[in-house]
Image: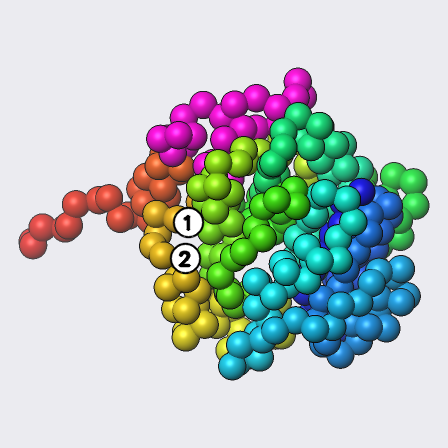
Amino acid sequence: MITFFTIPKPWTGEAATLQENAIGSWRALGCRVLLLGDEPGVADAAVRLGAEHVPSVARNEYGTPLLDSAFAQAHAAARGDALCFANADIVLAGDFTAAADAVLAALRPVLMIGESWDTPVPASLVFDEGWETRLAPGRKRGAGALDWFVFTHDLFTEIPPFAVGRAAFDNWLVWAARDAGAPVVDATRRVHAVHQAHGYGHVAGGFATTRSGPEVEANWRLIGGKDRVYTRYDATHVLTRNGVRKNLGSTLRAKERARKAVWKLRHGQLLPARLPG
């Protein structure tokens, strides 16, 4: 059994619908779900959705939940030896459990990750037969935008107190698993994870606050440098139709270096300076 855990936003407005969809999809998979934190409406939602409410999550001086506290709570409450930390707006279907079963059967300890697809989901989802086929295809968010993490109990038992929802802690988790010697499996080819499109009205200052400011600066200090910011291209393995295989070039970060070079070319950062006249 995989124990899901997430840190929901206040259960109001747009966030309420998105979170209802996401957590409803996890429950439809038959998974146990922990809702962490004491935001308004979360306790009632846990009862309605058949999830479990864990209110005691530490926060920083800005009121933002801290990742180390959330992971410690999840480790303590989880049953079985596999957990999944996911953002509360991520919708997952049967291909997720099939992938997790394949990876957990092949490797221990292990971290499984994958890229998700930005998809508009305008209404509440009904989890009847074939519900996932009615979703729009969406578009990939990018190799560094990681929204869900399946891992065995022996990983992430101690992590820094990152501010949740601020830059780069998700990429650090990939580095930390590799640094611990654990295989990291990129399941993007086999899991179509839906990131429901949304605004950032729940964050004071909007989207910019998630990329700059004192909380972001604190996260970067805890990360310890850009060389610890890993993406799915840094996975040691990939999950294909034929099972788990090694990700060639991951030791030297070949795919990630190539991705960054292409990004810089597209944004003009490798072009020569324009000569006068």
* Magenta-highlighted residues: 232-255
Residue nearest the observer in this picture, 225 or 28: 225
Amino acid type at image mark 2: Ile
Q: Position of residue 252 (x, y in %)?
A: 35, 31
As displayed, is residue 243 above or below residue 150? above
- Dot 2 corresponds to which residue? 223
Q: Position of residue 152 (x, y in %)?
A: 65, 42
Q: Position of residue 63 (x, y in %)?
A: 57, 79
Which residue corresponds to the image point at 41% horizontal and 74% vertical from the top-left?
Answer: 213
Name the N-terminal-most of marks 2 and 1. Answer: 2
- Dot 1 corresponds to which residue? 229
Q: In the image, is residue 243 part of the stretch drawn in magenta?
A: yes
Looking at the image, residue 17 sits to the left or right of residue 182; the answer is: right
Amino acid type at image mark 1: Val
Which residue corresponds to the image point at 24% horizontal and 44% vertical from the top-left?
Answer: 270
Report helix, strand or loop for mark 1: loop
As displayed, is residue 180 above or below residue 74? above
